[in-house]
Amino acid sequence: MFKRLFGQQAAAPAKSLAIVRNITVGRTVALDPLAWRRLGDETHFALDRDALEITAQGVVALDGGTFVHRFYTDDHIMLQAMSDDAGGAAAYDFTLFTPWSSAYPPNDGARRAWQDRLSEPVFKGAPEGLPEYPRFWFSETDARQPPVKLWESVYDDRAATEPYAKIYQTCMLYARELAGGRELMIALEQEPEGGEATHEIMIGIPLDMAEFRA
């Protein structure tokens, strides 16, 4: 999952929002709670509901014609999918993320320190109350690796042809293996056009296609 999230092309304005397995802005996604309950007490992933009201939708266009589709709730829970077409007709690699922490870096030094942390092969999460997470992207090497940089266009209206926000992101994906399955973690700096940068951590899980529907 996410293995092709490297390199990016400029996204053209959407003619219409993608509909991925019937998911788009204004729809409800039903989840199977066993998707995270099977991880038991080991996981830091937590979700207090089995339905998501989708109120915003993001897209990232990558080199080679691959797309990342993101579906958001008002409290920033994110369902993500990959596809090889802008419409999301043949989507794969479904994941679900919940927010863990969010902070405004106080100065440029804090931003550089964050990027340094994202470049290491293991994210040491103690400052955020998390364990260590091995890098999932670039896991074939223990060398320092600059984080991935991308632009996400975000829409909050199913009829919109222009995004209401464009967000520049510097990010890295991590994963740790638990007895009940894999736990994901994505750490990123995001900076909306015209806005302030924040440092975000989200905890996630892979989703099988049978574990959600809209």
Image: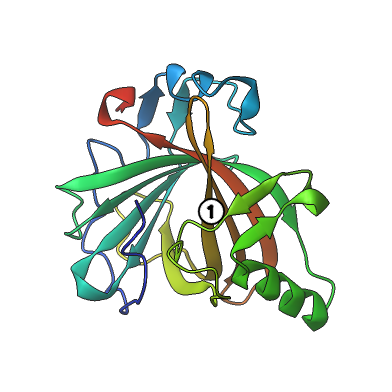
- Left or right of 64: which side holds 100? right
Q: Is residue 196 visible?
A: no
How many discs mark residues in the rendered view?
1
The image shows residue 108 at horizontal and vertical percentages of: 78, 82
Q: Residue at x 21, y 47 (%)?
A: 91
Residue toward you, 194 or 182: 182
- Left or right of 177: which side holds 154? left
The image shows residue 115 at horizontal and vertical percentages of: 66, 74
Disc 1 residue type (three-letter): Tyr
Residue 44 lies in what quarter of the image?
top right
Colouring scheme applied when the structure was drawn: rainbow
Q: Which residue is mark 1?
A: 174
- Left or right of 170: which side holds 30? left
Residue toward you, 201 or 182: 182
The image shows residue 113 at horizontal and vertical percentages of: 76, 75
Q: Residue at x 24, y 43 (%)?
A: 20
Residue toward you, 141 or 27: 141
Residue toward you, 79 or 110: 110
**Considering the image in quadrants, where does the C terminus appear?**
top left
Q: Is residue 49 visible?
A: yes
Residue 130 lies in what quarter of the image?
top right
The image shows residue 150 at horizontal and vertical percentages of: 45, 73
In the image, residue 89 above or below residue 66: above
Disc 1, SS? strand
